[in-house]
Amino acid sequence: MTQQELVTRARELAGRRNKPGRCLDLAWWTCVVLGAAGYKVCFQAGSASWPLRQDWERPEGITHLSYEWNKPSFEEFMARKMDETPVENIPLPEIHCWAGLVDTQEIVDLTPCFLPNVVWNDLGFPYDGEEIDYIWSPGASLHKEGISYHANKEATLLAFNLARTVMGVP
């Protein structure tokens, strides 16, 4: 399968959760699809940041959209859950999730297509950055474009355990 076919398949499997704010589901299904296609893949979570504009001469102070990992453990996170709330409806702490390819050190993230929507709805101004459908690129090369991903062990464990719970995987 081509990269685009793999991305399309992961989005299909994510179904109704293929939307802004559901990086957990998209990262999970990306890992499932890439693993089934023979890639050595690693579910990752932590902090991520994307540029919001192409014209850096504009005077507005906001330049990037970022999700900065803050540190509850899985147990602390689940303890905050209300008894009757389905686990998939619990808001995540500030975190971002994606897939990492072990052999090539590439990042695969299907959420950048939602950046214009998130910037407009959450921040209230139009997105002026490059339109990106998805990222499939070596992590080191992304820094040149102002994009950063920083995986964190505790964030990854929290997100992975939550994803397993949501997906019903023992």
Image (spheres, grey):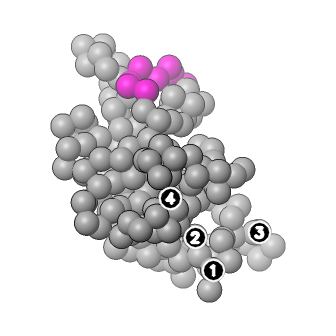
* Among numbered discs 3 and 1, the one appearing first in the sequence: 3
Nearest-to-viewer mark from 4 and 2: 4
Amino acid type, callout 4:
Thr
Q: What range of the chain is rendered magenta? A: 123-131
Amino acid type, callout 1:
Val
**Coordinates of residue 105 in the picture (x, y in percent):** 25, 60
Question: CB atoms at circles 1 and 2 under 8 Å apart?
Answer: yes
Residue 135 appears in view: yes
* Among numbered discs 4 and 3, the one appearing first in the sequence: 4
Q: Quadrant of residue 54?
A: top left
Q: Which mark is residue 98?
A: none
Alpha carbon separation for disc pair 1 and 2: 8 Å
Q: Which mark is residue 169?
A: 1
**Coordinates of residue 134 in the picture (x, y in percent):** 44, 41
**Coordinates of residue 96 in the picture (x, y in percent):** 45, 55
Question: CB atoms at circles 3 and 1 under 8 Å apart?
Answer: no
- Disc 1 crowd rating (10 Å Cα; few below 14, some 14-19, many 20+) is few
> Is residue 104 found left or right of 112 in the rendered image?
left
Residue underneath mark 4: 30
- Disc 4 crowd rating (10 Å Cα; few below 14, some 14-19, many 20+) is many
Residue underneath mark 2: 163
Amino acid type, callout 2:
Ala
- Disc 2 crowd rating (10 Å Cα; few below 14, some 14-19, many 20+) is many
Residue underneath mark 3: 85
Nearest-to-viewer mark from 4 and 3: 4
SS at circle 4: helix
**Coordinates of residue 108 in the picture (x, y in percent):** 39, 52
Which secondary structure class fits the magenta region best?
Answer: loop
Q: Residue at x 56, y 46 (%)?
A: 8
